[in-house]
Image (cartoon, coloured by chain):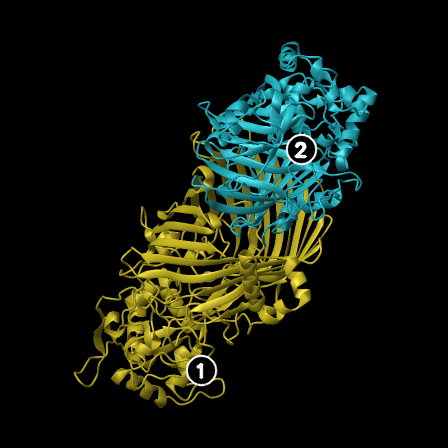
Amino acid sequence: MKKHNSRNKIASCVLYLAGSVTAQSVLAGGLVEELIDKTTFFGQVRLDAAYNTSGSENPYNQSDVPFQDVEVSRQAFLPPDLGGGRWGDVPIPALPFVLDTRDTVRRSDRLPENNYDFTQTILRFNGEMNTKFTRNLSLNIKVRALFDPEVNAGFDAMDVQNDQGGIAGGGGDRYADTGRTNFYQAKGRNGKNINPFEIAGRDYMLDFPTFILNYKTGKYDFRFGNQQIAWGQAVFFRTLDVANGLDFRRHLILDRAIEEYEDERTPKLAFRATMQATSNITADAFVGKFQPDVLPNPNSQYNVIPSQFYRPLDNYYSGDFDKKLDFGIRIKADYGNFGWQAMAVSRYNSLGVFRWAESGINKGLTPFGGTVGAVVETAYAAKPKCSGSQNPYDNFCRLYDSVGEALSHTPFTVGPGGVYSDKEWFSTASSVRLDGLDALNTAIGDFEALRDVFASPAANATEAAALLNTFFIGAGGSIRGQVQRDYYREQVFGLGGSYVNETEDIDSFWNQVIINLEVQYTPERVYTSPDLGKNGLTSDEYIFTAVAEKWHRWSETFPSAYLVAQYMHRSESDLVGLHLSGYGGNVGNTDYKRSDGISGADYLVFAGFQPWPNKKFVAEWAFLYDIRGGILAQPLIKWNPGSGLSVDLFYNYIKSNIRGDSADTLTRSLDHIQEVGLRIAYQL
Amino acid sequence: MHIRKYDLNFGRRELLKGIACGAGTGILMPIEKVMAKDMPLTNAYPDELYSIEAQTKGKISVGDYITKANVEHAKHILDPSMYDQIKNAGRRIKIKAPTTDLRQLFNHAYYEAMQRNIAEGRTGKFNADGNVVDPQGNPWGGGVPFISPKTGVEVWANMAMSWGRADANTYAIKQWDFGADGKLEYQYDFQWVELQMQARTDRKVFRGYDKELRRQTVYFTNSADVRGTSFLSNWSVDQRQIPDLYGYLPEFRRVRQFPANQRFEPLIPGATWFLTDPWAAGDPFLTWGNHKIVERKPMLIACSGNFSGTDDNWQPKEQEGNPIFWESEYEMAPDIIVTSCEPVAFPRSPVSKKLVYVDARNSVPCGCVRYDRQGKLWANFEMAFGQFVGGGKDGKRVVMSADGKTPAWSWTYVMIYDHQNKRMSRTHHAKKGVGTESLFQIDEDWLFETYCTQQALQSLGRA
């Protein structure tokens, strides 16, 4: 009876959350009682917590960006467009109390410190309902509801509202930029949720990872609804696993490694048909609504986009990408010890392509920019308005009525918590695989309003530094950047083969090793360009993955350990999809070094688990090694004491400079993460 | 009445002699003759082999419980695991009257198939590879190949070729796992499916799969952490081959191939059984070796009954005061073949040997005791069987078999007691579970498409 009541409670919860009717009315009807009889319910409550042991904060968040605690000298220069020669040739002399053209700045003097001792504290409920209407027809709904009690609240934009006029909104929905740290919402620039099956707020979210109607008849199976589709044999490496994007909001990709992307795959509304074509061959096809990756918000614990930028404006709706379809087919064959698979997918790349964006925020330099700002405003106002075919490149004229209006047509906005110095600019750019010099020149080239406010291309880093510091001083502190995200269709082709090795000596370690080779080829894939250019960077990519799996019993007492070794080579992009030409560059509090790229990315994985007898305990491990010197290590111990309880204790250790240049490693972006994690789950 | 004709130890002596000379089943009359003419089993064995009173010198009678207090009187007719459970773990078993109708030990269709074999003088034989073939040399079809097994390997072949003694079986299984302190720790529901590709009662090959013997799927539906996990074993007709194993793990959301030699690993936390255990011959019989008949003797087994006392969901009663055990009914069986074999194809097996207690009358294993590498008693996969007759509101409940006319026969419960860790996995054949259902009238095509293909695993898997 207790169990029945418990089931009814879960049923109420799932049905209520499903949203069509209230739980009370649902449970009241006899028809529904009958349906509940055909239904299974599952519920689980879970605590996910992680504690930062690195002593470092996320370098993409306000409290620990490059040069956060370093005093940096800045000097304003006469712009070339105002007769200053080349950038840096003519410093504007400082006059005490009159012209503040030279200063030193330290970010931490301008911004409050908001550290995360706990990098993760999430309370969540996972519910599942499965109704079998008939032997053929069933409905499956999974609910994921989570709440963040905000042990550390994170950055609050209101704390800096009195500096440089605060962080201004405009030009799109700035829900994640202008207030307290927003941990979960993910919206397009028009303010609509990117995931239509989601309700989210700053500190909570609720979504339906699965909401499908399943019809199975004979050798055919059809699924319609919000769902995840996973292809390929490689674990963690997504060589053929291309149907769904990833949701990085909750814990990036740092959950229990053996779960792969269970909590990360972004579900999509899709129709999927699978067929057992022959005794050996299965065919699997889908067509679904394109659903992009979801990135963490600025200043959230696992944010990976510099918070000196506004949250990227997502053109998912404004670019009509929400109306686009992905589709694909896979054939998989197994012949005992041999197998092969082939797939073709036409999809929009879910990571998308980032490029400079017009801010749409009309905010000038005065009064925040002191005398330099006032001089620039005056100089701008002194220019006659361009007319006819005139432009600010070739003519001494202005396009807009004010500097503020001009800046609204550029990717830059005056405001606190942006970039304060040239050094910070270059280092921050390279931290996200951009080249600071190229990105600056591209912005100037793509947005004529920047030329309008006296910016002009820089020939080298020295000139760029002069330009940047002039603008930062003129802005009265820092300038915030703006990027946007677009998506491009690509055709992805994949081939794979599997082989189960059998040796004459059945006691050989190599007996029953399962080998899988997978290759992906994508012609004309479009990537974010390291200069944030508007057309991205296009190149053909191939990805090769080799996987060897083995279950090996070391002793009579312990069950077999699962061991998997993998190798991946990527010709153009890194594991998360950023182009390798943006690799290199300078790291942390160092001077500019050009991002000259790397020729290919190679990763090794060794992972596995060792159950204790009766599986009450399971020791797990996962090591990802970037052969250029980075490592991600995750040891984990899982305890299944029974009675519905399970406990995971793990440690995430990321390092980027085991050898070589850390700027060339994948893990450079995350090497601030060293955390001990705990997950406690209880089945209702 | 043969009891007057023979002395008390006649039956035991004959059984022992039979091992030495490779005698078949039946002391007074071959089992084939009993089966062919539907005669009572008392025609095959002297009464004293059926008599608990005779075997315990009058200390225990039908209707009695065997407990710690009197188990010493029955030690010689219990397997060592049962003896230890009763002696040291607080178990009790109730003694029922012996079964003398051979039909009650079989599924109807299976029985009929064997009668046809007898009528045709048809029996199995081993080919050069050691596999069982029919007289024409084709893969065996129709009933157990060796109705009257004379060697260890024949017994193992009988057990392995057709587990559930029907062409298609699908069981809803509920499992409770208890810790050493007797507390319930884990609870599971799963569907267990067996579909014979060959060795079928109709002697046909299912859908032309002539390279396969059986497809078998285990599909977990509860608890939440294992829900959606499933494994499909494709058994080759060549019993030297370890089955191909495919699995769907919810975390991966796709079907993956698993190494075939994972036969000694707990599939789920808390479980005391491995893939090698079910039906005693959980692995192809030629992947084990040194098959021997160790002993033949009368013993107590749970070969019949154990259904009428179950509830509407076919759940047995828990033992009063010691719920890690079901209340169980045991009876005297006249001829138990104690057979052993060793895992020769699994060099890293933690098991040194299995000792299986097989009812010679139907070649069904009632106890499978495995020993660790040190030769110590490890665990017993104890199975109870019977016709699904009795109980219900009016006491006349009958669950029909595949033909819809005759009573179903199947296993009723399985208990797997781990003697070394004092843990118990207690299961029963349920009418329904969480997302599971037992069926006896089965559309085999539906069963195949729903459970027995890779696509089926994908479809069953948690989305």
- State the quadrant of the N terminus of chain A: bottom right
Identify the colour of chain A in the image. Answer: yellow
Query: In the image shown, does B231 or B328 lie closer to the viewer?
Result: B328
Q: In the rendered structure, the residue with mark 2 lies on which chain?
A: B
Q: Amino acid at mark 2?
A: Ser
Q: Quadrant of residue B403?
A: top right
Using the image, determine if residue A329 lies above or below residue B3: below
Q: Residues within 10 Å of mark 1 (few under 14, many from 20)?
A: some
Q: Quadrant of residue A437?
A: bottom left
Q: Position of residue B17 (x, y in %)?
A: 64, 10
Q: Which residue is mark 2?
A: B304
Identified at 72% across, 44% down, the residue is: B397
- Within 10 angstroms of label 2, few (less than 14), some, or many (20 or more) residues? many
Query: In the rendering, what colour is chain B?
Result: cyan
Q: Is residue B234 left or right of residue A436?
A: right
The numbered dot on residue A391 is 1
Quadrant of res B157: top right
